[in-house]
Image (tube, rainbow, N blue to C red):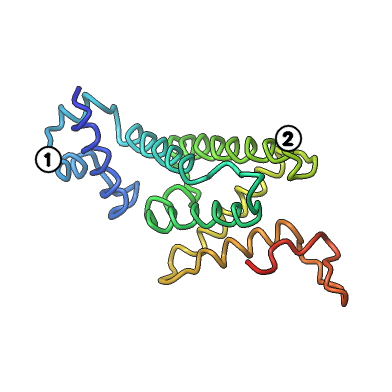
Amino acid sequence: MSVQTRGRLLEAAKKVFSERGFYNAQISHIIDEAGVARGTFYLHFRSKEEIFKELLKEVVSELRRIIKVIDPGDDPVRQIVENIAGVIDFALEERELARIVLERNSDPELMRATDEFFEEVTQMIRDSLEKGISLGLLRECDTQIIARSIVGALKEVILSLLDSEEVNTWEVAREVLDFGLRGLWKESEGGESHGSSSALQGL
């Protein structure tokens, strides 16, 4: 099986899903876009659900590239903001694909695929949290709960931005992290936060 043909089918599927949405997309649309025969499609994928799952795997690989391991020798807060901004930027570059992934739906097969995707993303974040704890950068916590909280927050924030023309992803990422670090506590007159240190000042 040709690696090039498989890649062409994946690119075609991404474009078709983006333009038509998952439900309206058909295998015939994908093979027309890729310029291959129907039989060629079935040499690589059994269904449009399977090729969609493969696209999700590619998204996970891209997220692994975007989310950098925190270097304790550099400003950890800035690095975390960069990671969050990178994830948001990627989602906005792939808006329609992001919309399909983020919006809940009643298709059992698609729901299983997206649930598996978010489990992988949650595990990635959990691994990062545990690394931060081991380096002494983060407090001891239930990394499973915190990772799910981060994923849930990012899902809602990104979904709310998909229809926006211009987004300052750095400011959005900064606000998300600020909420995570300090919650909603107001700073005291002395300039200190009731919740924790004002780590984001100056970013």
Mark 1–mark 2 Cα distance, whole angstroms, equals 51 Å
Q: Quadrant of the N terminus?
A: top left
Can you give x and y, in whole percent of width and height, for residue 86 in the image? 49, 54
Q: Amino acid at mark 1?
A: Gly
State the SS at label 2.
helix
Q: Quadrant of residue 141?
A: top right
Q: Amino acid at mark 2?
A: Ser
Residue at (42% x, 58% y) in the render: 92
Count how many numbered circles sit on residues in the image.
2
User: What's the mark number on residue 120?
Assistant: none
Q: Residues within 10 Å of mark 1 (few under 14, many from 20)?
A: few
User: What's the mark number on residue 134?
Assistant: 2
Q: Nearer the viewer, mark 1 or mark 2?
A: 2
Q: Quadrant of residue 13?
A: top left
Residue at (54% x, 64% y) in the render: 170
Between 21 and 163, which is closer to the camera in this rendering? 163
Q: Residue furthest front?
A: 73
Residue at (39% x, 57% y) in the render: 95
| Residue at image mark 1 | 35
Between 13 and 180, which is closer to the camera in this rendering? 180
- Looking at the image, residue 183 sits to the left or right of residue 167; the answer is right
Can you give x and y, in whole percent of width and height, for residue 78 in the image? 61, 57
- Looking at the image, residue 75 sits to the left or right of residue 28; the answer is right
- Looking at the image, residue 66 sits to the left or right of residue 152; the answer is left
Can you give x and y, in whole percent of width and height, for residue 115 in the image? 53, 38
Q: Is residue 39 above or below residue 84?
A: above
